[in-house]
Amino acid sequence: MKKIIFICMVSVMFFACKSASTTATTQEPLSTKLDRPSQVAIKGNWVITNVTYPGSDYIKVNSFDLADSKCFINSSWKFISNNNKGEMALNSSSCTAFSSPIVWSINNQGLFVLKVVEAGTKAKRVREGYLLKVANLTENSFQLIDNISVGGQTKDVTYQFQRAN
């Protein structure tokens, strides 16, 4: 029995988890009404100060199909609320640098809709995106919460944003 548990633990440590967040195009219809006050509240420049999830010492999470979730710590994000565009940049010294324009919105269900736009691609041609929950929104911080599947169970990945100076 101990051998089976040990094998299970080791296998979980070696398999990276991928985000289980819902893509915006494949699930039930989303509300098209936007939460303008929340969008205006996050307008500006932000930095992800922490990424947390259960088992983070043993499990790797590939966030947004881009990089390991820990590579998002100290990443910079710019949100423009009047046209729902922005930019994000991974700039951790221990990870591959990456930057991209984004298209985003917050619907009236409290879901943050994120699309990463590749260079040379028009945002309207991007058909897939990510749905995250917005939580604890204040003037200087907020969280985006994604879901991952680990061993058939859904776990939350929390991205902690702080307003950049």
Image (cartoon, rainbow, N blue to C red):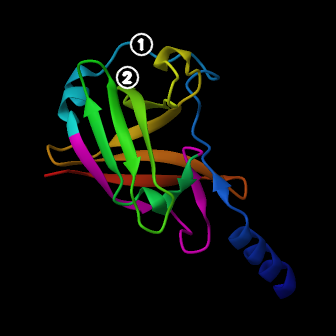
Label 1 to label 2: alpha-carbon separation: 7 Å
The residue at 78%/82% (across/down) is: 6
Taking 15 as reference, is 36 left or right?
Answer: left
Report which quarter residue 155 is drawn in: bottom right
What residue is pinned by disc 2? 107
Q: Are marks 1 and 2 in contact (CB under 8 Å)?
A: yes
Taking 138 as reference, is 68 left or right?
Answer: right
Q: Is residue 29 magenta?
A: no
Amino acid type at circle 1 is Thr
Classify 40 as above or below 45.
Answer: above
Question: Which structural element holds mark 1?
Answer: loop
What residue is pinned by disc 1? 32
Amino acid type at circle 2 is Asn
Mark 1 Cα-neighbour bin, 10 Å: few <14, some 14–19, many ≥20: few
Residue 128 image label: none
| Spot occupied by residue 132 in the image (x, y as percentages of width and height) | 45, 38
Q: Nearer the viewer, residue 65 or 157?
A: 65
Q: Who comes first in sequence, dot 1 or dot 2?
A: 1
The residue at 29%/18% (across/down) is: 83
Mark 2 Cα-neighbour bin, 10 Å: few <14, some 14–19, many ≥20: some
Classify 122 as above or below 77.
Answer: above
Report which quarter residue 45 is drawn in: top left
Classify 67 as above or below 55.
Answer: above
- Magenta segment range? 45-65
| Spot occupied by residue 140 in the image (x, y as percentages of width and height) | 16, 48
